[in-house]
Every structure is written in C-alpha cells, then in structure tokens.
Image: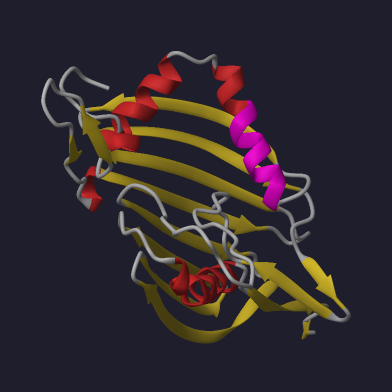
Amino acid sequence: TDLGTLPVELCGSKVLVAADSDSQLVSLPELTLDENIRRYNVVASLAEDGSLLAEVLVVDGGVRAKKSAYQRNVSEKAEQIEGWQAAYSDIIPGAVLSDYNYDAVAESSWVSFKIVVPDYIQKSGDLNLLSVDLVPVAVLPELKKGKRVNPICFGTTRKYEANITWSLSQTWSADSMSDSNKVSCDAATFKSRIVSKQNRLTFNWSLEKNNSLLQPSACEKVRKFCNAVRRTRKTRIILNKLTDGVTN
C-alpha cells in the first residue's frame, strides 16, 4: 500500500481514536466499486474429445491492483502458480495450469494463464453437460438456516466481473437460448446473462458488494440471495453431440 493510502481491508471500517480527552469512533473513507474491482476474462474452447482449453486473464483495478501487485512481487512465481492451481482444482478436478504470467501497469495489475482439462464434459445418463462458469472464487459466504446471533457483512465495497466465452468444436452444439437474471439484498447485487447459439456460448456475471452491516433478522433473505447466486454460477448446459452425421 502506498504511503497515505489505506489498505483495502480497512476502507469503510471504524477505528477508535485514542486521545487525552474522550476517545472517538471514526469512520474511515469508503471505496467506490471502481477502486476495488477484479475482472475475469476467460476464452474457453471445447474440443471434439470433450477436453477443455481455457485462456484466463485476471485484472485488478484501483487500490486492489496495488495490493495484488505487491503480493506478487514478494512471493515466488511457483507459489503463485500453486495458489491458482489449487483454486481451479477445487472446482475442476484434473485441471492443469500452464503459461503463467503477471505484470502491473499504471492502475491495473494482471495475471494470465491457461487451464487444460482432459475430460471436461459431465455425464448424467445419456445427457452431456457443460458447466459454463470458469471462475474459481466463491465470493459469498454459505449461511445456514436457523436463528442467527451475529450481524452479517460481506466485507469491503468490492466488485467482481466475469466474461466467459465458449467456442465448441463442430462435434458439439447447444440449443439457442438467452436468459438474464438479477438478484439482490441490502449488501450486494448480482447480475448474470447467458446466451448460447449452436457452437458459441457466453456467460457474463457481475457481483457488487457494499459495506453494509445487516442485522441477524436479515439472515434468511441474505441466505436466499447467496443460494441464488451459487445456483446461477453452477449453471450447466445440455450439449448435443454429432456422431456419424447424427445429433444425439
């Protein structure tokens, strides 16, 4: 963090200022969404044999860029690769990461790499299923049903954006569809859009979180919001497979 700049984690929080007289609780400045943003751009291709190749670019902006640039400069490249490899292995068993690069330019910091998965298609009976989201971060907590004692906070004001583009080999195709979704609670808003047509598919989503402190009574509404976001991000598309000139 540059001299005079608050760390991301402290922005929007409250501090107790000690003084000779009465101490005072002071609110630290809030971040705007553009000052704490992470963008995922993924270009994915599905081969005839069902294997996946994804080119991933992760770009941080604002004060988040400075933080991530610093963290990468003080850590070994092998350690960074191990972290991303573990993140992808959690959501895609068998994923292999390669061609890792990173840099910081002006107000942005980025990493790029490739992900290869030998057998990405999932089977459910006779159905071929494609999981469209290729972003590993969970971004939201899992809240359980039942009475809650403690308040709920999603942390510092922050924005995530994901733009995922799929290209399918001629062996695979998806039925044409277009669907948009928006869900929100007092602490966050999630938007998504999925479009598929034959051999091309796009899945875009964004999550905006604010620094609101929600009372325990809001738990059920927040829990439903988090579950709705997870369901959308776990979307799977049925693919048609062309075999000997016949669509299955």
| Towards the viewer: 71 or 49 | 71
Q: Is residue 129 left or right of residue 7?
A: right
Q: How is the image coloured?
A: secondary structure
| Towards the viewer: 206 or 217 | 217
Q: Quadrant of residue 70?
A: top left
Number of numbered discs overlaid on the protein picture: 0
Image position of 228 with respect to 210: above or below: below
Q: Residue at x 48, y 68 (%)?
A: 203
| Towards the viewer: 55 or 73 | 73
Q: Residue at x 52, y 78 (%)?
A: 196
Q: Quadrant of residue 209?
A: bottom left
Q: Residue at x 38, y 64 (%)?
A: 214
Residue 58 % position (x, y): 43, 42
| Towards the viewer: 168 or 163 | 163
Q: Which residues are magenta?
A: 82-91
From this viewpoint, which residue is outermost toward the front? Answer: 21
- Image quadrant containing the C terminus: bottom right
Residue 56 % position (x, y): 50, 44
Q: Is residue 235 left or right of residue 177?
A: right
From this viewpoint, which residue is outermost toward the right? Answer: 125
- Image quadrant containing the N terminus: top left
Residue 2 % position (x, y): 21, 20
Magenta stretch secondary structure, dominant:
helix
Image position of 245 with respect to 187: above or below: below
Q: Judge whether residue 184 is colored magenta.
A: no
Q: Residue at x 60, y 20 (%)?
A: 79
